[in-house]
Image: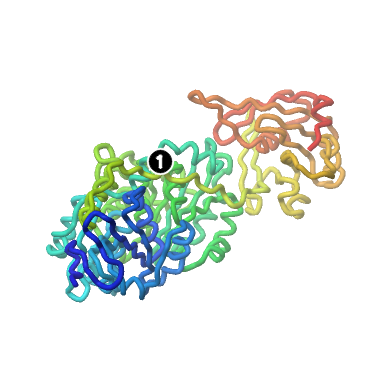
Amino acid sequence: MDTSGDGRRATGDGRRATGDGRGGSVLFAARSAIALYRLLDLLPVFAGDARVSRVFTLVPGSDFGVDALAAVERVGARSVPWDEACRDTYDLIVTASPKGELHLLRGPRVLLPHGAGFGKTFRGEGSADAPSGLDPEYLMPHGGPPPALHALAHPGQIDRLAALSPRAAARAAVVGDPTLERILSSLPLRESFRAALGTGARRLIVLASTWGGESLLRRRPDLPFELAARLPQDAYQLGLIVHPNEWSRTGEFELSERLAPALDAGMVLARPYEDWASVLVAADALITDHGSTALYYAAALDGPVLAAYDGGDELIPGSPMAELLAHAPRLGRADELEKALESYRVGTGRDAAASAFLSPASDQGSALERLRLELYRLIGLPPPVAPVTVRLLPIPAPPSRTPSAFAVRVRLDGDETYVERFPGHVDAPAHHLAAEYGVAGERQSQSAALLYRRTDRATAAAYSVGWTVDGWISHVLDSYPGCRTAGVVLSPVHCVARVRGGSLVSVRIEPPRENGRIVRSDPAAVLSAVHARPAGVSRVTCVIGGRRYEAHLSPATADEAGRIL
């Protein structure tokens, strides 16, 4: 039996490779969730081919393998225990990490990177100063052969590997990056992604945290909430991408509890598989540590990248990620964000990404085709005739929580009313507190000068009781002595409100038009402007998120007052 990894198939007593055109078996061996996610991006290579059987196994030994098999179950794939995988023989073994006792598996082995740029090294692990993923000690354990194929994303990576091990580099090939390919192919869905996240015309600022002691969340755990507390809610939206290893180490419950103040302020927490890439496509700027997520963003969108890394032992000097961080503006305090974004030099990210990935302009869409040719060569089967289809990224999940109370700052400047809203649980100077009735806590409702509600969805209940608009507003003003204004949001451009002591008014909002698009803001922000203006005005020019919204006020009609909520 030959297990040298040179492409010849073994003939043990387990699954046997046929090599005669009848079919072949492929084992996807994942040591952690992040490695598994990279393997899942490879699946279109074998899509539609009934000759190939696909099975997964968990390589033992990682502290971050707890979520890997759960992810396999979510996609409905078949898995086998490690002991069984070691007894069988496969036509191809595909991995995305060189670590673990992979030499116990039988069959030619293919190694994919599980990140971008090979920019990290971990002290006390493997060869001194060797990039994680290119370390000969793991590529050729116990002096054994290197993988039959080491699939890389850029020619420079072969040069780096050759400097460490010419023997390993001899079996390396540049195929591109399937994950980047999915991101690039999904760029036309950017507006759909932003709509799903509720971003609107706001700037989506995404933080990216890798794992380990030098990561953003370990060193600056308060940064997400510091930004949420300082950035106006109608101008900015926050997102966070956390490395799958950190999800595995911490657990979703604990991670959500630690991030609760920022999540309560509406921050998007991207799921570790696929969701993170969709959020990345939707982003307007990225704040990053030394994790490779920033290289994907730079290669795909070339938007502003801000450095939030304080240095350490892990980042390899001269690597693409090190070059990106060296030339990106550094974000110190949260209140320096706008200044840092303005100082970003266009092209900084693109230049760094060019040394980590093949050119998107000339090679987009070819990574999976290259991989298919290489993998079917190793299996000994002709590839399918139909071309490989890149699977687009899914629509991301919306924020799990949305703010229900706002500390509102108001500035009157002639006919214009400037409104800035911040999370209501932030201790900051404000003109008034605005709270969404029935969603905000009672303590905030009791303290709110503006209480509003949004129209409920229609219910199919056989028995129900519903307020009229006028009835609810009167009820709130009677029940909450501290409330000066109560309003109902009927649609994105229509509200009805009453200032205490005044009459019921209809508020019609005229959103601005930009480049053929209509830009809508949260109508509740307009209600804050109406609340701040003297009674009796017929028009309020609101400046919200840097845009002007004309609000036309008129006495509410009987139909508006009697509308059932």
Image point (54%, 24%), residue name: 513
For residue 415, above or below residue 370: above
Asked which colour scheme the image uses, the reply is rainbow
Badge 1 density bin: few <14, some 14–19, many ≥20, Cα 10 Å: many
Amino acid, disc 1 = Ser
Which x, y percent locates residue 67?
46, 65
For residue 198, above or below residue 145: above
For residue 97, above or below residue 126: above
Image point (84%, 46%), residue name: 481
Which x, y percent locates residue 493?
66, 29
Q: Quadrant location of the C terminus?
A: top right
**Nearest the eye: 368 or 502:** 368
**Nearest the eye: 427 or 457:** 457
Q: Is residue 179 visible?
A: no
**Nearest the eye: 521 or 161:** 161
For residue 142, above or below residue 425: below
Left or right position of 345 against 67: left
Which x, y percent locates residue 12?
25, 72
Q: Quadrant location of the N terminus?
A: bottom left
Which residue is label 1 attached to? 186
**Nearest the eye: 121 or 228:** 121
Left or right position of 512 against 150: right
Which x, y percent locates residue 494?
70, 30
Left or right position of 53 against 197: left
Q: Is residue 184 visible?
A: yes
Q: Quadrant of residue 483?
A: top right
Image point (34%, 47%), residue name: 180
* Tally of numbered tags: 1
Q: Secondary structure at mark 1?
A: loop
